[in-house]
Each structure stands twice: as structure tokens, then as C-alpha cells.
Amino acid sequence: MTDVTVKIDGQDVTVPEGTLVIRAAEEAGIEIPRFCDHPLLAPVGACRQCLVDIPDAGNGRGFPKPQASCTIPVAEGMVVETQNTTAVKAQQGIMEFLLVNHPLDCPVCDKGGECPLQNQAMSHGQGETRFEGTKRTFPKPINLSPNVLLDRERCIVCQRCTRFAAEIPGDPGIALIQRGAQQQIGIAEDKPFSSYFSGNVIQICPVGALTSDDYRFRARPFDLVSTPGVAEHDACGAAIRIDHRRGKVMRRLAGNDPEVNEEWISDKDRFGFRYAVRDRLTSPMIRENGELRPASWLEAVAVAAQGLAGAGSVGVLPGGRLTLEDAKAYAAFARDTLRTPHLDFRSRPLSEEETGFLRSRVAGTTVTYADLDAADHVVLVGLEPEDEAGTLFLRLRKANRAGLRITTLSPYASEGSRKLGAQVVLTAPGAEKDALSQVSGVTEASVILVGERLATSPGAYSAAAELADRTGARLAWVPRRAGDRGAVEADLLPGENGLDAEAMVRAGLDALVIAGVDPDDTADPAAFLAALDQAGFVVSLEQRVTAVTERADVVLPVATASEKAGTFVTWEGRRRPFEKVFDKPAAYSDAEVLGHITAELSLVGPESAGVADETVVSSPTTTDSAATTTDSAGFRLATWRLMLDNGTLQSGDKALAATARPAFVRIPAALHAELGDVVTITGDRGSWTLPALPAEMADSTVWVPTNSFGRGVWADLASPGSTVTVEGAQ
Amino acid sequence: MTDTLTPVLTANWGDERAWTLPAYAATGGYDALDVALGMAPEDVQTMVKDSGLRGRGGAGFPTGVKWGFLPPPDPENPKPRYLVVNADESEPGTCKDIPLMMASPHTLVEGVIISSYAIRAERAFIYVRGEVLHVVRRLRAAVREAYEAGHLGTNIHGSGYDLELVVHAGAGAYICGEETALLDSLEGRRGQPRLRPPFPAVAGLYASPTVINNAESIASVPAIVKNGADWFAGMGTEKSAGVGIFSLSGHVKRPGQYEAPLGITLRTLIDLAGGIREGHELKFWTPGGSSTPLFTQEHLDVTLDFEGVAAAGSMLGTRALQIFDDSVCVVRAVLRWTEFYKHESCGKCTPCREGTWWLVQVLERLEKGQGSPEDLDLLLDQCDNILGRSFCALGDGATSPITSSIQYFRDEYLAHLEQGGCPFDAKKSTAWAEAVQ
Ligand SMILES: Cc1cc2nc3c(=O)[nH]c(=O)nc-3n(C[C@H](O)[C@H](O)[C@H](O)COP(=O)(O)O)c2cc1C
Ligand code: SF4
Ligand code: SF4
Ligand code: FES
């Protein structure tokens, strides 16, 4: 692209051809006032605040009237004046108009103190208005969604919110309605604004027109302390800003990281943070006469060390939410301290094939968001980005809008796939291996993104690797949790002759060290709980009271993400370090707690701490028992988690929960026509009667959200990869 | 030469059932279509360009030149090309397209077919103002007749040329006459002007190359094809060629549509209309609708062509001559117009949306005699902050009556303040004023 040189306020600026004048001015450090303009949204030129004088358009002739700098591209030799009398008069005139109908209720407005309208009225306005008339009024506020509220009096109809919704996540549902001064943002009568990314409109609203039920009237910006952070809800590594006051998080905002999340985050990343204060474990506990009782750290650590030292075989299940630092600590703890090979971070259905895949194809690799932009084709397998990886979803959608071809191998044609412009190859769970061998148009410029669900589809990971090898395409694994990739990097996987998580459950080990595992997430929740009950000794490192802490012999409270510094590793392999938000003296990271146990164990005696028990028979997990037994009457069970569901890290965030999409079962359209809107699904673990929607679906397949009903699919309905029956419900 | 009526578009309006196909055909209707189909499309374009026809929708852009902006047909990317006829006619005072479509819809239909052929469009739309249902019905009947007679549809007149014509009724918004808002509205969206570029010629209706012309512009095409470019160019003035419909309304004895060469004067037109209402004198008038700055007595001899009106400080616009005699309070008239703009502002941009809201309040105050002389400067400054700052010409137009009325009638504004109210008796300006007295 050729460069163009323009003169802005007397300064020469050289920018690529096509750059908008407002951006070129930024390059020169000149800030033109603006409202509707947003660098990540298509220009509209609606507010007219960014007017500048252009005495020479580059052809020797000037524009007779001021021009909107956010819609006009630079031209060679152009002369722009942003602060001469013409420009200033125009800018002041618009500012005065904007305030004509503005309520000026800054003292009670959430945005007061960080408001572009307030700030720019001070910097570019006249100070006094000449308007003496009657302002337009509206009843306020109204709900756009259960969480997003609109104060129409404050709205300057810049269209940032509507443009965001339509362009970025592709969730229209808010739109301009009425005209003239009555023009306002509206929703359809029977349909609230529904988007997993709705909170971004609050953040980019240049006035206080949009507020969240969650944060409204809770704090003033100037009372908040901000700490940059990294979102812990998925493996995307979105930059966030944590705003807190007196030791309490008041809100979270999107950070600006052009390489990762740009300026957007999901509502889960924004509004899901109260888990960190609810049901928190406040002190270590030990079991005595069958009951847990609070204990001092000294006592609890000593009991933990003693129990572990005495155990013949120990398994370590550290979960997928760890920082890289904590993950490394677990690896060292298992290998060096306990000398056990029974180590596995996976607390969900897994396979031996996956273990090999993670070690050989994931650890140490890098595929970035930018690589997706540059790709000629992205193939998704076993991955639903809109639900499972919000940032990835937005980046893929952006790339698709810029021309990227996307193919997804998915059990049904989801809304998310439609928003990605993806070509859907209907693929029943278990059929990914064959489907992958038939995908066309994959080249060395392509990227294959596989989700962790492929662990339940025999041969799928290998087929993805084979496709990558055959075509030269790049391959990346997109797990669901913030700590998953870090755990792979730390090799929190079974060592030589070690048992994986599912095998550990079956093996009846003497002792278990468990951190951040929800039994209901595992492939066989009942078996997991039984294993806890049977194990001679269970040490639980946890933030909150869970089914594991209730069965543990020693419970050791650990810090949440905001209480410690650390590093998450994104699905890309990118290190995302973050700082501690709160200094809580008694909040120890997992690594610190493990350090204490290690120290204690060294006192107990290194020889007895060498607990690896070679007598445990290694019985690696295979999933084919379940996955390929298609009984002719059965439907294959496809499942993933909706972004907002019954997940533990969302508990306590009522406003967030209210925005969750209603959970439905998806069944083939023909079956829906036959059975109607409510169906009973029966699997090997139970039966659910649920509302169903028709979908364009792979043959003989039904889809159920993993964790939206009861204790979730694995606990209440069926085992991974199994088949279920579907009947109409009366 | 410019002082007589030259009925072209209006010639058959008085005919028996002029709106039917047989009546239109009896006057040689659809003959021009045969002429055009016998020519290469490019030659029809050239003919229209040579005729000097300028857009009759207000801005006066040369029609043939506009057609030439369409990118040449690209076999690699065969996007459809569209002709869209703007028959939204909502500018206060403008009353020519609607009578034309009412009296002789086939003139427009024939114009659409020839113009579409010239630009190689296979689909055309007429966007009609929603309130005039009777016109929509008449237009639809004419289109049906044209289809039945083989003037529309496939293989028109055996030429191999196909054209589908759709009559679309708007929902009643002035802004939908603005060409890009019209396109949004036609696509089923809320009518608001689009950011340009891309220009409609490149990405218009459904992002395809599109020509948008006023109904009168398109209706002028058959006569040009039939009589030749020179015939048309020979009328009017050098730069404002041809004839046009002048709609006279208000305080003249015989209001109505007067078709005359461009360059005629209001003095002549008032004579043709039987003069100003008995016992009164001309006070002010709009040359091209309410969005064009007002004229007064002193402009009676301004030639009504694009250049003449512009030189005198206004715009020819749509030749909507609203005539106000000395019984009318200019402040009241300007307030009414401003209320119209406030009501019709689409809301997209700040200066028009907020400015018209505010202007109305200041004018209301002045009309009631409650303002101050400084309010006039305030009005002028508000107008200065709107004109050329708004997103489209609606906002600009809203300032025209205000700035021009203050220019010519400042004293009348001040009289309101001195008297603490309006010095006029509003009843006297009504059409039934005589009867009341
Ligand atoms: C607010 C507004 C309303 C308009 N209304 C009309 C209209 O009703 N009819 C019309 O032909 N042009 C109208 N125009 C002008 C059109 O935008 C456009 O210039 C015209 O249709 C072009 O046709 P022409 O070149 O044949 O004149 C309007 C413009 C504005 C800004
Ligand atoms: S609500 Fe905010 S972002 Fe949306 S249009 Fe109004 S001012 Fe702009
Ligand atoms: S000037 Fe602005 S608000 Fe007014 S009609 Fe045009 S775009 Fe809409
Ligand atoms: S910032 Fe340029 S018009 Fe709004």
C-alpha cells in the first residue's frame, strides 16, 4: 500500500493510503473530538463532532464547508486544520447542539468522571449553552436486556451500540427506532437484546445512556482503583481491567489488546466475578471423627504431609484452571516430591489418544490470532467458538467478514456457525475422523482448530494431525479453560506407567490430591465421587466448598485469580502474565501451598515420601467402549457447554445469569415435526424431559447442552460418546 | 421566447381519460419506445446527454452524465443494474410529479422503459410517496396495461430487451426522497441517508449499480427521444435547457401546474395564473420549495433557470413556487416550515436533529413576541452551525427559510417583539378570508 503525506495543523503526517483523517491526526498526536467514531467499527458520520476545516483537499481546492474527519480519507497534499476558527466554531456548534436535549445529570450518572461527552464538552465546548427551552424527556431507564439498561435522555444516538451489535458479534436486536429528536435505541417488543457480548456496548457508549443492572449506581469511576488482568473464563486470554474499591471488585472492563481481544470481552469475562467471594473457604480444615473442622495452616499442612507420606499410591488431579506457575508447581510436586506418575489435569472426558496428541502436537506450538487473519481457510472440529471461546469467535467473525473461509465440522448448523459465515459439514459425534479425511481446500496457509471434545471421538485427534501433516496446514488445540494450555506446557499428564484421570478413578489409589475439579465435569461423576470415598486419604486445594472438599481429609484454601499474580497460557501458546489485584495476606497460591507441603514432607523423610507404587496396574483409558456402539434405535449424543450455564464460576452473578440464552435441546427437524416442542431423552445414566428446537442436524443425532440442566449431562443423563433414546413427552 | 407556455409533459392532461393506455396511445404514446429500441443503448444515453436535460428533482445534475457514471457492464461480475425513479415528492410546495402520474402515468412508464434500456437495467422501481394512494393505484393500473400490451416484460416490442417494473409505495417520510435514504427504504430498512462513497452508481440498490432520477426527469425522456436532442436543447436557456413544470400555489388566482421553458420569470407566471389575489400584493415566495431561500417582490424578474436563481441567492430546486401575499406573517410561515423540518428530520445527525428542535422553540418565542432582538442573531448562528454541517441536505434546507426571512424581513420579526405578538390577522391569509369578512 502506498503512503500519503498530509499536513495537519501544520504538521506533516505520512500514513497509508485510505487512512481516515481522524486516524491520521491521531498519528500526529492531534485529538479531534468525536462520538460516533470508533476505530473498530465502520464509520457512519452521524454525530458530526469531528468536523475539521480542509482548505486544500490535495488538488489545490478546499472544501467550502467543514468536513467530518471520521469519514474522509486522506489524500496526497491535503491540508487539514483541526483547530482554526472554522473548525473550532463547527465543533463548538455541534457540542452545543448535543447538549440541547441532554439531561446534564452527570452528578448521578455512572459515566460521570469517565464520560467522553463530559470530557469533550469541557475541552471542546463553549462552557455555557444558549439553549433556554424545553428538553425532550423520556421515562427512564428501560431494559434492553435483563442486564443492559438504556436511559434515552442521555443517549446521543451515535449508533455505536447498534453498530457494535450488528458488526462485531452479529447479534442485531437493538436498532434505531423513531426519528428526529425522538430517535432512540429500541428492541423488538417481544425480544430483548440478546448477545454474549452485550456488555461491550456499555463500555463504548460515549455517554451514560447504557448501564448494567450489575454495576449501576454502585460506584463512581474516581473512587475505583484499576488493575489490568487476564480473563480466567476461557482459554482466549482476553485482556481485562479490574476496577475495585476497598478490597472488592466493583466491575470488570475490556482491556485493549490489539493482538488478542482488541477491545471486546464476553459478558462472562465482564460480569462473572462474584464466584471469587461466595462460599469461600476461609481457613484450612481437617477431618476428625468423620467431621471437618477448622485447623491452623501448620496443623493442616502437617496432616496433609503425613497422609501423603503414608500412602502407597497417590494420584494428582490439579484441574484446568491453574496458572502456568501453579501448574509447574503441581508437576514438580507430583514428579519430584511425591514421585508419582499418576498426574492428569483433565477433569472431563479424555482419551489416551489425546494424551499423546497433547504431548506431540500441542505442547510448545504456537498459532496466533493473527495467523487466523492471514489464513486462507480455517477448519473447526469439535469446537463451538461462540459458546466455548468468545474472543476466538469474534476474531474469526472479523476475519470471515474480511474474506476468510471457515468450515466447521459440527453436529448441527448452529447460530454461531451462521454468524461465522462458516460452511457447516454436519458431523455426528464420533464421525469426525471420517469427516476430517474428506475436508477439502486445506492448504499450508490453512489452520485447523480442534476442541477438547475430540477426546470422545476415537481417531479424531489423529485424523486432524494427519490432515495437518498431509496439507502443511497449522494445527491448534482450543481447550475451554484458562489453565488447560498451561497445564499441557507444564506436562500435567500421566508419566511413564502413570494413570490418566479416568484410570485413577477406577484404580482405587490410596491417596488423591485434587484441585479445582468439579466431579460433575468428569466422564463418570458417580465413579469419581466413589473414588473419593474409597481413597484412603484425600487432600483438596480449593477456593470454595465443593463436593470434593466435603469428602476430603484435608482442605487447603487457595487464592483466586485476582488474589495472586501469575500467567495464563492461551490456546495460541501465548503467555499472558497478570498482576495480583488484592493483597490478601492469608491467600496462598496453589504453588505456595504445595511448597509448604513439600517442606513438611522433607521433614517426614524423603525415603517415605517416595510413594510411587509400581504395583498399580496401568489401565489406560479408551473411549471406544462408549463411542462407537451405535445401537440402531439410539441417537448419538452431541453436547457442549453454552457460554452461560450452571458453571461454578458464574454462580452468584444474577444479572449475568438473567442474560443466558434459554437452554434447548436440538433435534433433527423431521423428528421435531413428529415429536413436538418437548421431548424426553433417556441415556444410560438417566432421563430428562426438556424443551426442544428443530435443527439442521447430522443423522440420528441429538444435541443437549452439557451443563444447563440438573447436575449436567455426565451425572444425570448419559456417559460420554453414548447413545440415547428420544421420545415425545406428554 | 420564454414567455409562453410550452406544454410537453402536460399536453395531454386534459384529454378524455388521459391516464389510460388507449388515450395515451392515441397521442402517439409508446412511439418513442420504438425509436429508442431501434437505437443502441449508448446512443440513447448520448441523446439525453446532448439534450441538456438536468435533473428535475432539485439539484439539477445533468441526467445523461449521471447515467454515464454507471460502471461499464462487467461479464466477470454480472451484478444487476437498476433504475430507481424518485416519486416521493414531499418538499413543501412541490406538486408536479404527483399530478403528472395522476394525469398521464404512461408518460412516466414509457420514460422508465426507455431510460432503463439506455442504462441496460433489467429491473426498475418507481418509489411513490406513501400518502398518495390514488396515484399509486393509477400507476399500478398503467403498469399492468403496459405489461399486457407488451411494453414491459420479456422481449419488449420484439427487441429482445426485458424489463420488470415495480411500483413501490413509501411510508410517508420526507427524508425518503433523499436518494440514498430512498434506497434503504426500498430495501425494507429504515430510511436514513447513507454515507457516500460508495455512490449509488457503483453500489446503490442492493449494493448494485443504480441510477436514481426524479419522476419528471424520466418522464421527459420520451419527448426527447421522439423530437430529438436539439429540439429540447433549443428551449430554455443555454445551461438550463428544455421545459419544466412550475407549480404555483398560494395567493394567485389560478394555482396549478404551468409548463414552460426554464428561464421564465415569476412575473410572467403570475400573469398566466391570473395575477395575485384581488386587493393584495406579492410579499414573498419560494422559487424551489421551502428548502430554497425566499424571494420577494424584487425578484419578480429573476430568470427561473438554475443559474439565474442561484445568482440571485437562492436555488431553482423543484420549481415549487409558493406565493405569499401581504396578508401573511413571514414569521408564522417560517415557523410552520421549521416545524415541518423538525418533524421530518430523520435523527441521524446532531445538527439537524437537535438544531431543528431548538430552532422551533426560538421561533415560537419570537412569534409570540416573547423573545429578544438577540434571538435573531441566535437563529442566524444556529443556522450557521447547521448549514454545511449536517449529514444531508435536509438539515441545510431547514435553514433556508430562516436566514432568508431574516435577511428580507428583520423588521417584521422585530415588530412582533415591539407589539408583544403577531401584528397580522392570520384569518386574512386564508382562501376563505373574503367569505369570513
Ligand atoms: C430531504 C430531501 C428530500 C428529497 N426529496 C426528493 C423527492 O421527493 N423527489 C426527488 O425527485 N428528489 C428528491 N430529493 C433529491 C434526490 O436526493 C435526488 O437528488 C434526485 O432524486 C435526483 O434526481 P434527478 O437527478 O433526476 O433530479 C430530495 C433530497 C433531499 C435532501
Ligand atoms: S446508547 Fe450510547 S452507544 Fe448507543 S446510540 Fe446512544 S449514546 Fe450511542
Ligand atoms: S440532515 Fe441529518 S438528521 Fe437531518 S435528515 Fe439529513 S441525515 Fe437526517
Ligand atoms: S465522530 Fe465523525 S461524525 Fe461522529
Image: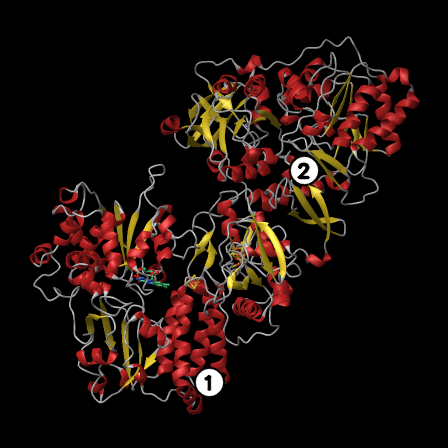
**Above or below A136: residue A73:** above
Left or right: where A445 falls relative to A515: left
Q: Which disc is residue B370 wearing?
A: 1
Residue B129 visible somewhere in the drawing? yes
Whether residues under marks 2 and 1 lie with C-beta atoms below 8 angstroms apart, the answer is: no
User: What chain is tagged by disc 1?
Assistant: B
Left or right: where A171 falls relative to B193: right
How many numbered discs sit on the rendered protein? 2
Residue A375's x, y, as percent? 55, 32
Mark 1 residue type: Gln
Name the secondary structure under disc 2: loop
Circle 2 packing at 10 Å, graded few (<14), some (14-19), many (20+), is: many
Q: CA distance from mark 2 to mark 1?
A: 63 Å
What residue sits 41% from the left and 57% below the top?
A: B193
Query: Residue lying farthest bottom?
Result: B419
Mark 2 residue type: Glu
Q: Tell me the quarter of the picture where residue A465 sits.
A: top right
- Along the viewing direction, whichever of A471 and A592 lies nearer the viewer: A471
Circle 1 packing at 10 Å, graded few (<14), some (14-19), many (20+), is: some
Residue B407's x, y, as percent? 41, 82
What residue sits 90% from the left and 22% below the top?
A: A602
